[in-house]
Amino acid sequence: MSKKEVEMDIWNFFTSFIVQSIAFLTHEVGVGEAVAIILFTLIGRLVLMPINLLAMANMYRNKKAISALKPELDKIKVIHKDKPNEIAKSTMALYKKNNIKVLDKKSVINIASQGVFGFGMFQALQQIVFNSKFAWIANIAKPDVALALLVGVITYFSMIMMPGSAEQTSTLLFVIPAIICIITLISFPSAIGLYWATSSVTSLLQSLVLNNYFQKQEINKAI
């Protein structure tokens, strides 16, 4: 058996595990299909939470370190005006000197784990035949525009509230993913939208808790 076949077997096992877990929650635990999706998403995010929190905390520390370097970064822009390559080179050198890593091991692991879980859920939910309603959604097997818009809004706020989001970051960088989210969910079953909404709400709550924690730390340091 080739390496590619082994990888496919592992992936199929993973998506099958998701399908069977949702079926277990529905048939054995007795919750509705939508609630089963929400519960399994929460369980998955809970498992991934430690690495996610570590990555978010690291992003926040990088943000504070970069803010402290703002005078030097502004100076680089003045010195190398009209030379974007030199600006980038000098900026990265300054980051390296101050031990600031734009993308470290924790961030890579976090992005990879979130991506694997998300893509696995996406594929698994398309394999399940749904036929139930939830809240205002008549059938979670069909797309729902209101849900797509709601998820887009939640996604936008979850991104701007991330501890590592810089104040000077263009709003467009947060709006574009939210728009892509809405366009995508309009074409897919509401079951996928429920997963996406639950995941985004979880990210938003994590960000709020971390932001509050870091703000208290700063207040304590200032006293």
Image (spheres, grey):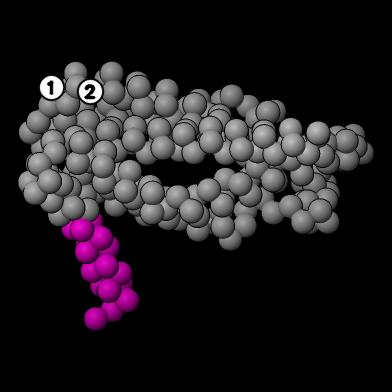
User: In the rendered structure, which amino acid carries the disc numbered 1?
Assistant: Ala
194 vs 85, left or right, is left
Residues rendered magenta in the picture: 1-17
Question: For this rendering, which residue is in front, 67 or 182?
Answer: 67
Q: Which residue is mark 2?
A: 144
Tell me which corner region of the image, top left, top right, bottom left or bottom right, holds residue 149: top left
x, y (%) of residue 30?
10, 41
Q: Label 2's element?
A: loop
Q: Which residue is mark 1?
A: 138
Mark 1 or 2 closer to N-term? 1
- Asked where in the image residue 8 lies, by quadrant, the reply is bottom left
Q: Nearer the viewer, residue 87 or 212?
A: 212
Verify whether residue 11 appears in magenta: yes
- From the top left corner, tell me how far across and down residue 43 is, in percent: 32, 48
Residue 26 visible? The answer is yes
| Nearer to the camera, 3 or 51 | 51
Q: Nearer the viewer, mark 1 or mark 2?
A: 1
Residue lying at 19% horizontally and 18% vertically, measured from the top left = 136
